Image: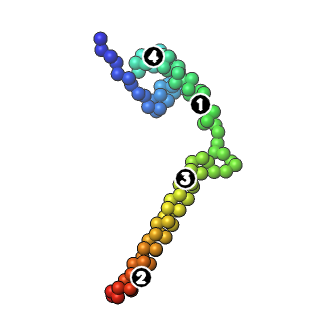
Amino acid sequence: MSKRTRRNHTSEQKAALLKRHHLEKVPVSSICDDSKLQPSLFYTWQRQLFENASVVFEGPPKDGPSARERELEARVAQLEAKLSKKDAVIAEISEEYVKLKKELGEP
């Protein structure tokens, strides 16, 4: 008895199959036969599509920056702090080096 390997469908593939059914009016049975899918899987994808459809109609939040923008701003602030700390360390080491060089009388 041979085992079937699990196939992973991309979101584009899922959308194309659902689009064929809803826009082109191709029967679910035909789509499932052509794609070798179980109808229950097709209907699961359809249910997920309709459950998440409201996200498409939501615009960006109008009250301020998005979560992604806030995340990026926090990352920039973190990197700027790290850079200023490095600059301070380099300045301190350079100052000690020049002082030591003058004490030893090297040109």
Residue appearing at x 33%, y 86% in the figure: 106
Q: Which mark is residue 38?
A: 4
Q: Is residue 78 above or below residue 86?
A: above
Give the residue pinned by disc 2.
99
Which is nearer the eye, 86 or 25? 86
Residue appearing at x 56%, y 28% in the figure: 49
| Label 2 CA crowd tier, 10 Å (few <14, some 14–19, many 20+) | few
**In what element is the residue under mark 4?**
loop
| Label 1 CA crowd tier, 10 Å (few <14, some 14–19, many 20+) | few
Mark before the other along the chain sequence, 3 or 1: 1
State which mark lies toward you, 4 or 2: 2
State which mark lies toward you, 3 or 1: 3
Q: Position of residue 85 (x, y in %)?
A: 50, 65
Mark before the other along the chain sequence, 3 or 4: 4
Is residue 18 left or right of 4 when viewed as pictured?
right
Q: Calculate the distance from the C-alpha at mark 4 to the C-alpha at mark 2.
A: 78 Å
Kind of residue sitting beneath label 3: Leu
